[in-house]
Image (spheres, grey):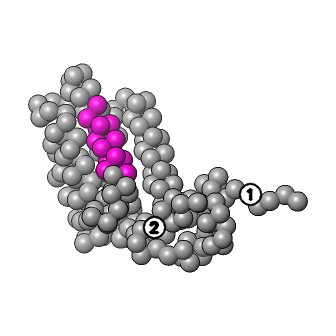
Amino acid sequence: MKGRPHIYKNKDLILKAQNVFWEKGYSATSLSDLSKATGAGAGSLYNTFKGGKKELFKKALAQRREDFKAFKIKLENSEVPIQLIKNFFLSLATEPKKSHSKGCIVANTLVEMSFVDEELEKEAIAILRETENLYKSTILEAQENGNLQSKIPADVLAKHLISVWCGINSLRRIYPNRKILQQQIELQLQIIN
């Protein structure tokens, strides 16, 4: 008799779980929430994710890394990578209200897991630092080829973009308004004109 399929290979299941974690946070998400969202029974989840909820959460974060890798490829293939970064930030203003309420799962994890779970906190930090390094190399290249006039060091500008990212994900919860968000994002991005 053929056994049940390995559900961890099912990207759809991980994305469904990710959405629950994103909306509720790691601590507030129960196994029942995950079962309901994914359609997988508690036993199936525990048999597949031996580390339980934490392992599933780590896979949800890993999926964000995959999205990051896709963005990195777009940047590497773009003739105007700085504009691509700006467009990415500006696109936040036009997202639906529910997206504004959710913020960023990585930034949320960093805040939620500080002083709670060092492993998950470090995972969130690693993802944000990878993003910072991508911004740094993109900015440095743009400065070297004359496409970015700012003399501010690339590492400082990259950290600024991470600050903007974390800040805008809080601000859009306060002001889920396209015009306000667009104004604030444009203001913050003037530094990389």
Q: Which residue is mark 2?
A: 21
Magenta stretch: give its range. Answer: 123-137
Front residue of 68 and 25: 25
Is 133 contained in the magenta span? yes
Residue displayed at 22% across by 53% down: 164
In the rendered structure, which disc, 1 or 2, sits on the residue that comes first in sequence?
1
Q: Quick check: 56 above or below 147? A: below
Residue 82 visible here: no
* Residue drawn at the location 88% of the way across and 59% of the way down: 1
Q: Is residue 63 left or right of residue 99?
A: right
Q: Residue, x 42% and y 44% (percent of image)?
A: 68
For label 1, the residue is 5
Name the chief secondary structure element in magenta: helix
Could you say which is closer to the camera, residue 85 or residue 26?
A: 26
C-alpha separation, residue under disc 1 versus residue under disc 2: 23 Å
Name which residue type carries label 2. Answer: Phe
Q: Tell me the quarter of the picture where residue 116 sits.
A: bottom left
